[in-house]
Amino acid sequence: MKNILITGGAGYIGSHVVKELLKKGYKNITVIDNLSTGFLETIKRLKKYFGDFEFKEVDLSDWNEVEKIFKEKRFDSIIHFAASLVVPESVKNPLKYYLNNTANTTNLIKCAVENGVKRFIFSSTAAVYGEPAKIPKSGITEDFETKPINPYGYRKLMSEQVLKDTTKASPDFKYLILRYFNVAGADIEGKIGQSTKDATHLIKVASRTALGKREKMCIFGDDFQLLMEYV
Ligand SMILES: NC(=O)c1ccc[n+]([C@@H]2O[C@H](COP(=O)([O-])OP(=O)(O)OC[C@H]3O[C@@H](n4cnc5c(N)ncnc54)[C@H](O)[C@@H]3O)[C@@H](O)[C@H]2O)c1
C-alpha cells in the first residue's frame, strides 16, 4: 500500500482528499499541517469517522523538521495543498505569499527529489490565468495563456515552473498540477466541510448571506449585460 504525504490535510480541500483516500482503503497516510487556517477538529473527525492516519502539526517553513519527516518515512507520493490563499492579502503582504507559497513549496519539492519520491500532485489555482481578454463559451482551457494579476497567482505559477524544471532534470520525478476555480461543497455525509474562518470564497459568502449570517454580498463590475449574454 502506498505511503502518501498530504500537506494542508486539516484544511478544506485537503481534508476531503484525506477522507476519500481513507474510504478507498489507503492506510499509510501522513498529514502535515500548521493549523493556521485548518482545524484540529477536522483531523479528529477524519480519524473518528473514516480511519486512522498520522498527523504532524508542523509548519512547512520549519525546513529541518520537514527534512526529518522525509528521513523517518519513505513516501511514494505527495499531495501538496498547504498554502496561503487570500488574494487581497497577497497584494498587501506579498512576502508572506512568496515565502509560504513558493519558498516552502520549493523546499518540499527538494525534499521529495532527494528522498526518491516519484509523484507530486500540486494544488495550483485558476488565478494563474489572470483576466483573459476573451473567454469562449466553453470556458478557460488548460492551454490558455498564463498571465497572473496578483502575487497569489504569480507565486503559484512560479511553483508550477519549479516542478517543470525539476522534472526536466530528474525525469523519474513526475508531477500533476490542479488549477481549480472557486471550489464549493462539502462532504455528502456531513462530517466535514468548509469551516474556514472569514472565507472569501464566493459560494460560502453567498450561502452565508442567504442564511442571514452575513449582512450583504458585493457584486463588482459593470458589464452584466455581457454576463447575461454569456448565460
Ligand atoms: N478553495 C478554493 O476555492 C481554491 C481555489 C484554487 C486553489 N486552491 C488551492 O487549494 C489548496 C487548498 O485550499 P483550501 O481551500 O483547502 O485552503 P485551506 O486554508 O482550507 O487549507 C490550507 C491548509 O494548509 C495549511 N497550511 C498553510 N500554510 C501552511 C504551512 N506553512 N505549513 C503547514 N500547513 C500550512 C492550513 O493550516 C490549512 O489547513 C491551496 O493550495 C489553494 O491555493 C483553493
Image (tube, rainbow, N blue to C red):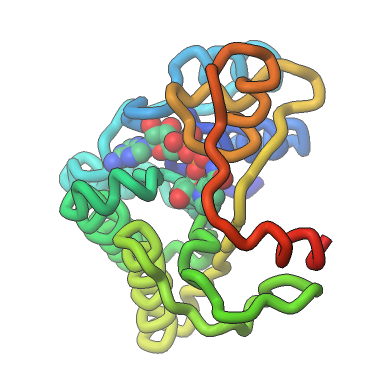
The image quadrant where one finds ligand 1 is top left
**Residue 89 screen position, x and y as percent:** 29, 44
Which of the pair 212/223 is nearer the observer? Answer: 223
Where is 197 relative to 4, above or below?
above
Residue found at x 81% / y 66%: 229
Judge left or right: residue 40 versus residue 215. left
Q: Name the residue at the bottom extreme.
A: 168
Residue found at x 58% / y 62%: 178
Residue 213 placement: quadrant:
top right
Q: Could one spot residue 30 in this view of the protein?
A: no
The number of discs equals 0
**Residue 214 screen position, x and y as percent:** 54, 17
Judge left or right: residue 37 versus residue 4. left
Residue 190 placement: quadrant:
top right
Which of the pair 122/146 is nearer the observer? Answer: 146
Residue found at x 28% / y 60%: 102
Which of the pair 62/197 is nearer the observer? Answer: 197
